[in-house]
Image: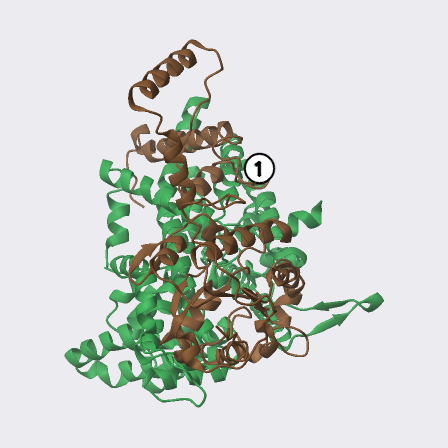
Chain colours: A brown, B green
Amino acid sequence: MKQRKKTPKHAALLILIIISALLCTAWSLIMRSSLYADYDIDLKQTPSLVLMMNGIREGVYPWDAKFEIPEGSFLDQAKDRIQAFFDKEQGNTTQTGVDKTVAETPSEIPSEPDSGLVPEPMEPISIEPLEFTTVDDTYFEDALFIGDSRMVGLSEYCEPIYSRADFYVKRSMTIYQLLDGKEVKFNKENKTLWEVLDEKQYGKIYIQVGINEIGTGTPEYFQNAYSQVLTEISVRQPNAIIFVNSIMHVTAKKSREDKLYNNPNINARNAVLEPFADNIHIFYIDVNENIDDANGGMRQDYSYDDIHLLGSCYEPFHRTLLTHGIVKNE
Amino acid sequence: MFTDFLKSGLLFSDIPFIFRILPLFLLIYYLVPRKARVWISIPFSLLFYVKNAGEYTPVLLLALLVNFGLSFLTARKSKIALGFTIVLNACLLMGFKILSALGFTIHLPQGREFVILLPLGISFYTFKLISYQIDLYRQKYPVASFGSFAAYITDFTQVICGPIARYNEWKIDYDSMPAVRGFKNRVKEAFIQISEGLTFFITGLFFKVFIADHLSILWNSFGTIGYMNLSVPMAWLGVFVYSLNLFYDFWGYSLMASGIGVMMGHKHIRNFKDPYGATSVSDFYRRWHITLGTWFRDYIYIPMGGSRKGSFRTAFNLIVVWLLTGIWHGITPNFMIWAGVLLLLILWEKFVLSKNKVVLRIFGQFHVLVLIPLSWVVFALPKFTDLSHYFLRLFGQSIEGSVINAKDYLNILRDGWIFLFLAVFCLIPGVRDFLEREKYRVFTTILLFVLFWISIFSASGASLNPFMYMNF
């Protein structure tokens, strides 16, 4: 190999990387309990700069950091005086801003919905629980399907449904993303679920998420988030029938081999979804009944990757939806 | 504690490896005197191997010790000793290939079972052992010291999936290098040497975690849909997605491995040289997995007479080489079909098309850009049903029970256009060489710095994605 004359300037790239890595590490450690408090990583296993990377992935940038000024400090007092001045001169606009934020990103949905969002109270048509009935494909003409990659499959390989219904679906979608108002491409535009629900009133809303959340929090934590999403859907779509779909199982093989994405964990999450059904407005559909084998897992011949249905195997899912229609007598 | 250590493998693209383990290793490596560095390398390499291969480490150690003992006999030009070592290493490799393919199980006390798997990297380290013994027999070098030999065989940059470096290429010739005295000069030496390797490493990391791993996600979606349900454009798109995925995965790995080697003071081992710029299948395989190709050339093809003993003998020699190439990759039918198809193409080029240079050039380009990518599909799909469905869909044949979304390929293009674009762009001959040639320019330094952090960002959000050639 031809020998070059090597000088320290040839180490510029290495020096740049060392300095930037040290800065990222230091910043991640300093901000660990504030800016990156939501990210839980084991620092014994993973370098701390992963906190910064995770933050950036979620839209939390290093420069978003805010330093708390100690109470009673000179700066604090000055800030209060300036704020008081503007409040007096222009009127307090802070409250308006907060309301707007909550409406766009309802990570904490108020127990009593905001008066601006609530439609006129409706007289209940019936308080008798309704029962499932078999319907035909025209039933899906006023339906919206919300969900993750399993619903993406339905939107691509179930012609009777995708030719009639709307789909607010995305691979890796989670209930937390829905709750936080993360945008998804819908009719060629990026929209939050709340924007989609505000634009059009649907007769039926099917929701199926949960597999991607298995590694996050407890079933109760998942249930709480799901509950908030359902509340918000109910508020924005008062006339829609909401179908909570069970989380689809994985194959028995996958379930045996995977410590996380297995059917006992899925069943634990399904167990907290089923009670949402009041059988008046919200209904629970066990989509696994036509998909499972005798082992209680997705049929092996229905899946290549043990998680998703093959494109040609959405018919059992479709059949389940057809036999689980709700028809209200108005 | 030890079982915790073995819980997961360790890849060059893992964040803890990049920011903790590699810097710590290099720090210790450069703190000790040059000639003692193999004694830092050996325990580190063994720990690296144990973490990835677990209970199969004794196989490597046994092969290492037996071969070291036999090397004294082969160095004395003993044909019997050489024959014995070759047969022994070949049997070790074939034995594990056959037993693992058959799912051979050892029944242990208390009803426990131990299923024989292919020890990680065995195809690579047995080939290094054989090349070492043959070159020793050919007196290319004297018997290595135990430290040097053990460091060569266990070298963590090569033990898992190559490159299959030769001992004389791998060995650092400290005697011919100017002495470095004083702490300051040693730090300077370390910084400059690590910087030399860093350009290879960063390019490889980018190829692996940004291009290959994202193409891998795209390719997995073909299986998820089901090969019988692919539209014709989707099936053809898949051919190129998988081909590019395999290329960038293996090229990325090879660059990272060689880059770490260069950081340690070894020479750069080139495993790929713009293969898709080749003009024929023969030319392609001179540029693809070069260390394996040259191994077969130097230890099988040329000793058998190469192309010097007439057409019939040349054809026979090629059949032997490609049969062994197929077996080396695996003894499943798809690898045999894959090797057989390539053999036929090479024979077709060598004995028919080569009579007219223009015809060879036109057909050769078609072979490289269309038939070789198609051959990778055979490589990718071990199940005959999947393979037959895929090829039926490639040519628009309908399969009973299939459901086809005619616009499925648009989803792949929408989700993966950036990765496909970058993959195709970096295929242009000389792109990687340009980065290497101009690596000390300010522009290149900034570009590599940006590529490094893009790769880290990408790797930090991904789950462990093993290198594809770890299966061999």
Q: Quadrant of residue B387?
A: bottom left
Amino acid, disc 1: Leu
The x, y position of residue B189, in whole percent, is 40, 31
Q: Quadrant of residue A197?
A: bottom left
Picture residue at 44% right of the left edge, 45% below the top: A115
Of all residues, the one furthest to the front in this rendering is A123
The x, y position of residue A98, in whole percent, is 41, 35
Q: Quadrant of residue B417?
A: bottom left
- Residue sitting nearer the eye, B239 or B246: B239
Of all residues, the one furthest to the left in this rendering is B358
**Does residue B213 sit above or below B354 in this rendering?**
above
Picture residue at 39% right of the left edge, 36% below the top: A61
Secondary structure under tag 1 reads loop
Q: Which residue is mark 1?
A: A43
> Is A45 on the left or on the right of B30, as rendered?
right
Q: How many marks?
A: 1
Q: Residues within 10 Å of mark 1 (few under 14, many from 20)?
A: few
- Residue sitting nearer the eye, B181 or A243: A243
Q: Can I make out residue B303 in this image? A: no
The x, y position of residue B206, in whole percent, is 37, 50
Q: Can I make out residue B253 in this image? A: yes
Q: Chain of mark 1?
A: A
> Is A202 on the left or on the right of A189, as rendered?
right
- Residue sitting nearer the eye, B133 or B90: B90
**Does residue A116 sit above or below B337 in this rendering?**
above
